[in-house]
Image (cartoon, rainbow, N blue to C red):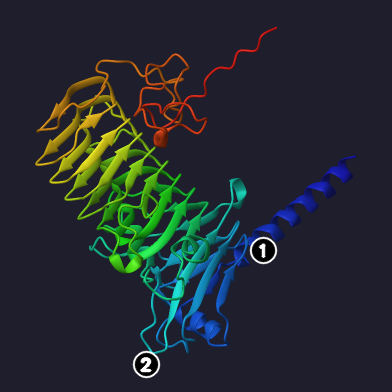
Amino acid sequence: MVRTNTTLVALCAIFALVLTFGNALAQPDEWDQDRIDAWFNVPNTELPFDDDPDGYWIQGDIQIPSDDVNVVDGEAYTVVFEAGANIIFSVDDQGNAGGSLTMRVSTDAGDDHGIGCIQVQGGPGEDMVTMDGVIVEEVQMNWGGIVILTDPSDDLLDDWQDRFASGNNISYCHILNASDGQAATAIVLDDAQVWVHNCHFNAQGDNYNAFLTINHGLYAFQSNYIEGAVATAISCNGALDDAAGGLEGNLLSQVVSNNHVTSATGDGIQVFEGFNGAVRNNILVDIQNLAIFVDNSADAIVCNNCIVGGSEFENVGIRILTAWCEVSNNIFVDLTVGVNGDNANGDVDYCLFNDIDDEFAGGADRGVDCQLDTDPEFVNDDPEDFHLLYTSPAIDAGVPDEDYNDPDDSLNDTSSRFAMKPVFVSQ
């Protein structure tokens, strides 16, 4: 018996040694600009990164396509991160954090041009795509881990509705930034188009500036969870360009919706310089400065958001500066100021306020059917769940217009999470 146990121990030790040695040899697959250019010059038009436990190093500042690629006119050169892929951004082959992946319009070869596209195609749970070390050693705010410069007016995609399906798409991605770096941004959109949804951003450092920075473009940013030491979580600058197909005023042209932003050290959502889309159905919790900031914008809609503060911060729910903005169906809880307006137009309608020091400040006007000092009656105090109890005074208290109706076709609730009405069955 003793001999058997000794043999078993020895075998286990050998197995552990082999496993340790194998892990030591395992290294992420290294991809720099030269290797990516060689791939696309074969020619290939799609570069897939599939599920690999060792991951992939994206080294340096990579351009897709670069001017060294013999591009085909009008062709999309697409990088695909598939479910379960582990992407590590680095500035060198040692894995030091930094670097970026830029999707751009090629300017080489005379009239020939191609565009770069990214498709992050993760899924729930273990199928999430992971991006780690996403940080740029730059002080500027407008460069980051994923940079998308693809022109939305390009003839490659004539129908704007097809762009979300065929163009840039970042979904089910867990983004981790490196600690204590310079100011940086995880995703940058510059006069481009993208759909970002169901992503989880976790800021681990003290100097990370934003999860998403947008300068003009066509986009939908939906159902993302953003947490950590973020100075500004989401920053959207500029109206949709006329060249993109005359979509100004269309609620589907610029949408920031159904996101959960928590523990931002600055602002939660900023929209400014002509933003003309919708900020709706978002949850913002413990935002230390302005939960939603609307500045110099036209026809912005801010509706059905739930903003919950913290008594240790002097925070503001919605700040409107030199803008026309529709503010309706929002819930404000535990804030210093609910709505602060300065040289702004538009009333505050069908909103609910509870435990607010000053519901309206700086010229913001109370409009139609606002409820003051009213408990919204959330299901519980869990910061992950702001659904309403069926007894909540916010139920059916929103704008009485069928265009605003809840998914169950009942009257709109004053909330970001509508309440399912109880159904009574007779015996």
Q: Residue at x 21, y 45 (%)?
A: 294
Say what amino acid the circle numbered 2 marks.
Gly
Residue closer to the observer: 137 or 26: 137
Q: Element at badge 1?
A: helix
Does 102 sit left or right of 301 as displayed?
A: right
User: Badge 2, how many Cα within 10 Å: few under 14, some, many 20+?
Assistant: few
Task: Identify residue for label 2.
Answer: 110
Q: Position of residue 222 (x, y in %)?
A: 43, 47
Mark positioned earlier in the residue sequence (2 or 1): 1
Does 19 sit left or right of 251 as displayed?
A: right
Q: Is residue 360 visible?
A: yes
Q: Element at badge 2?
A: loop
Q: Position of residue 187 (x, y in %)?
A: 37, 59
Does 337 sit left or right of 121 as displayed?
A: left
Question: Where is the N terminus found, in terms of image quarters?
Answer: top right
Q: Is residue 132 above or below residue 378?
A: below
Alpha carbon distance from label 2 to label 1: 49 Å
Residue closer to the observer: 117 or 99: 117
User: Badge 1, how many Cα within 10 Å: few under 14, some, many 20+?
Assistant: few
Which label sits on residue 79? none
Which label sits on residue 22? 1
Q: Position of residue 355 (x, y in %)?
A: 25, 19
Residue closer to the observer: 95 or 141: 141
